Image (cartoon, rainbow, N blue to C red):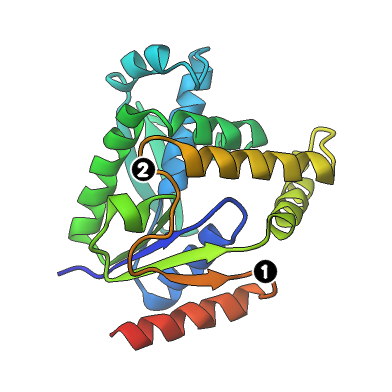
Amino acid sequence: MPMNIAIDGPSGAGKSTLAKRLAKELGILYLDTGAMYRGIAYHVLKKGVDPADAEAVRPLLKGIDMRIEYDPSCGVQQIIINGENVTPFIREHRISFAASTVSKIPEVRLKLVELQRAVAAENDCVLDGRDIGSYVLPDADIKIYLDAKPEIRADRRFKELEEKGQLNGMTPGDVLADVNKRDYQDMHRDFAPLIVADGAKVVDTSGMNADEVVETIKDIIRECK
């Protein structure tokens, strides 16, 4: 049976950074589920549809053919929608909140969960997101919940956007407000909200660097084997 590692947590806790490094060091697949939701959000916005308008979003889902590919030259997951590689466009700030919004629609989650489970059933892999251990893979071998104080997560997000030149006039206060808004939205959605999954180990990354987080998770994996 494939080994699956589920990593959940709020925005800015360091899930993607950890998952990518962990997968690389363990020599297994990394499935960026958040990028999949961003791909849906990008497609919806491109069609001129409000991500919060479930009635308008649902009909679009039937016309979305999503494939997950991996670029061996850089190890980065590529999101292909209807033949278009949307990966270069899904990290914009506007896509981040749109992804959180569109993910509240049950039909969106069901469509992507089916694909995520299919990948996990055939591969040893690390998956990160908001509901991996609680809903997508409730029987995952290892469950981790990464957390950090909102102010720390907002500071990380601000620096990330600054480095990419994507602040668009946003202040640290704006980013913190956005983080808090997204936390509330993720934790209070009706379908598969962000929670600490049963059996998950909670790791607070507030005072830790990337190396320390990776080693902490490795220790947890060793303990669980």
Pointer 2 or 1: first along the chain: 2
Residue 163 in the figure: left or right of residue 192: right
Q: Inspect this view and state whether residue 167 appears.
A: yes
Say above or below: 20 vs 92. below
Q: Residues within 10 Å of mark 1 (few under 14, many from 20)?
A: some
Kind of residue sitting beneath label 1: Ser
Give me the disc on residue 192: 2
Please name the residue shown 36% across and 67% down the image: 143
Quadrant position of the C terminus in the picture: bottom left
Q: Inspect this view and state whether residue 91 appears.
A: no
Quarter of the rendering containing residue 83 = top left
Residue 131 in the figure: left or right of residue 4: right
Residue 92: x and y, percent? 64, 36
Query: Which element is circle 2 on?
Result: loop
Q: Residues within 10 Å of mark 2 (few under 14, many from 20)?
A: some
Are the two marked residues, 2 and 1, in contact with CB atoms closer than 8 angstroms?
no
